[in-house]
Image (cartoon, rainbow, N blue to C red):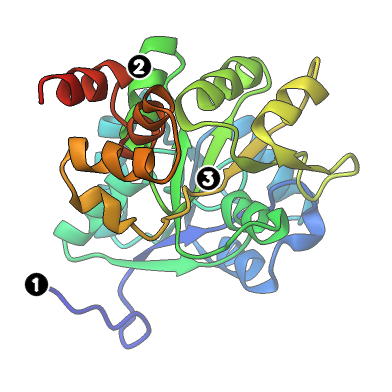
């Protein structure tokens, strides 16, 4: 176990600094001050981060830390901090560690006894969630689904029946395909499609999945998908009966035998043939 007292020592630290997700006015005063104080800034893309630093007149050396160099880059960050330097880790937009490899260097820093200090700010996931109009808690943040359709389907199958609101990120190039798989696997649930958040062309679509597919022929910008969780309905006491007795209840209430079998199959979420066979074996 470990207990961190973030501000009770003068040791060098790893700061996790949230950056704007579109509107530079969302960059906090504290975040700017931290970036001015640290010795080095580790970032996903130096070309993106240098523009942010230049805008706020911050002159600091940069080093790359991203998915393709995370082992070497992470080791270097830890060594630099152990040598006495404080480092700020930033992503291109939003919170470090969310849909980027930052959590790995955080884990490594903690294992080396380095203080990890979060500097909060914008997060596209939570910001989209609160504007969606869907139940905000509990929720599950998933991030990006796999770009391969078969793996994407498998991931969504594992979420089928999930009662919490779901949050995904998606690229505009895979949006339509992803929504069609969501419709097929999870159903025509209520959703929000949030794009270009905090930017000039910010747009929030609210409707259901099939409506979103019809509405967008093409789509541009960074996208967050908010999908409602499956509502948990109170279980019918009829489900405690065996299949045959369940069918007989509906027949006694006036349904034709085939209609009763169909209704039982739907309520039990089993194939109609299974109900038919069970009933006629009696």
Left or right placement of residue 82 versus residue 162 in this view: left
Q: Give yes or no for contact between labels 1 and 2 (Cβ–Cβ under 8 Å).
A: no
The foreground one among 78 and 228 is: 228
Q: Name the residue under label 3.
A: 167
Look at the numbered disc 1 and give the secondary structure of its residue. Answer: loop
Residue 100 image offset from top left, x and y in percent: 43, 38
Q: Name the residue under label 2.
A: 151
Residue 117 image offset from top left, x and y in percent: 40, 69
Q: How many marks?
A: 3
In which quarter of the view is residue 252 placed?
A: top left
Query: What distance separates the C-alpha of mark 1 from that of mark 2?
Result: 36 Å
For the C terminus, the image quarter is: top left
Picture layout, residue 111 above or below residue 70: below
**What residue sits 28% from the left and 44% below the top?**
104
Look at the numbered disc 2 and give the secondary structure of its residue. Answer: helix
**What residue sits 56% from the left and 21% below the top?**
178
The foreground one among 202 and 261 is: 261
Look at the numbered disc 3 and give the secondary structure of its residue. Answer: strand
Q: Which of marks 3 and 2 is nearer the N terminus?
A: 2
Q: Which of marks 3 and 1 is in front?
A: 3
Q: Which label is found at residue 112?
A: none
Q: Mark 1 points at which residue?
A: 1
């Amino acid at each position: 176990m470990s207990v961190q007292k973030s501000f009770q020592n003068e040791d060098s630290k790893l700061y996790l600094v949230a950056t704007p997700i579109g509107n530079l006015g969302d960059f906090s005063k504290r975040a700017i001050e931290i970036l001015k104080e640290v010795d080095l800034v580790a970032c996903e893309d130096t070309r993106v981060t240098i523009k942010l630093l230049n805008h706020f007149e911050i002159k600091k050396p940069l080093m790359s830390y991203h998915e393709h160099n995370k082992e070497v880059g992470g080791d270097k960050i830890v060594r630099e901090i152990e040598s006495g330097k404080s480092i700020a880790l930033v992503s291109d937009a939003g919170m470090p560690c969310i849909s980027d490899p930052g959590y790995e260097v955080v884990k490594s820093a903690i294992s080396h006894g380095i203080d990890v200090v979060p500097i909060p700010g914008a997060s596209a996931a939570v910001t989209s969630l609160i504007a969606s109009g869907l139940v905000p808690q509990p929720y599950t943040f998933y991030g990006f689904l796999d770009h391969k359709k078969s793996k994407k389907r498998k991931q969504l199958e594992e979420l089928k029946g999930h009662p919490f609101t779901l949050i995904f990120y998606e690229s505009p190039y895979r949006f339509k395909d992803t929504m069609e798989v969501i419709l097929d696997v999870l159903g025509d649930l209520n959703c929000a499609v949030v794009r270009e958040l905090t930017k000039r062309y910010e747009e929030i679509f609210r409707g259901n999945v099939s409506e979103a597919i019809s509405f967008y022929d093409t789509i541009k910008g960074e996208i967050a998908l908010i999908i409602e969780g499956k509502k948990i309905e109170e279980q019918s006491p009829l489900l405690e009966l065996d299949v045959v007795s369940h069918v007989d209840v509906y027949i006694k209430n006036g349904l034709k035998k085939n209609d009763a079998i169909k209704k039982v199959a739907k309520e039990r979420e089993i194939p109609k043939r299974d109900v038919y066979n069970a009933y006629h074996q009696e």
